[in-house]
């Protein structure tokens, strides 16, 4: 694997990348790799990304868990309503 060193990062950019990494719950290194791949139209595995992820967005595991938890009552059948 290739290693890169990026010098002269502004404090604002550093804070933004750190904030993004916290939001994604990933390391700074992984966040920078993901952002570079996204900006260049590549998927994380080096393949082509069609860009739909940027349009549709995505959920973290925690967001999905909260959504499932919150919407679980909608899956229950009220037997009284179906008599």
Image: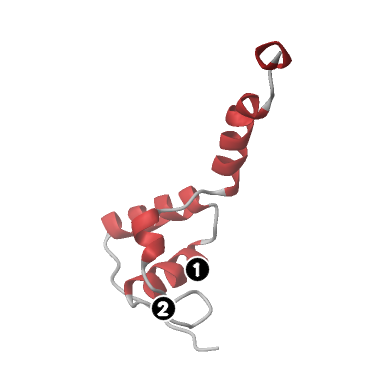
Q: Residue furthest bottom?
A: 2
Q: In which quarter of the image is the C terminus?
A: top right
Q: What numbered label is drawn on residue 29?
A: 1
Q: Are marks 1 and 2 in contact (CB under 8 Å)?
A: no
Mark 1 vs mark 2, CA separation in Å: 17 Å
Q: Residue at x 30, y 67 (%)?
A: 9
Q: Nearer the viewer, residue 45 or 77?
A: 77
In the image, 64: left or right of 43?
right
In the image, 83: left or right of 10?
right
Image spot of residue 68 (x, y percent): 61, 36
Q: Quadrant of residue 4?
A: bottom left
Secondary element at tag 1: helix
Q: Name the residue under label 2.
A: 42
Q: In this view, does 52 lie above or below 64?
A: below
Q: Residue at x 35, y 76 (%)?
A: 41
Q: Which residue is drawn at 54% across and 52% down?
A: 25
């Amino acid at each position: 694997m290739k290693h890169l060193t990026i010098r002269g990062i502004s404090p604002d950019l550093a804070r933004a990348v750190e904030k993004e990494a916290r939001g994604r719950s990933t390391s700074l290194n992984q966040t920078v790799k993901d952002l570079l791949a996204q900006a260049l139209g590549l998927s994380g595995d080096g393949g082509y990304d069609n860009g739909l992820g940027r349009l549709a967005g995505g959920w973290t595991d925690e967001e999905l868990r909260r959504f499932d938890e919150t919407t679980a009552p909608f899956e229950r059948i009220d037997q009284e309503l179906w008599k």
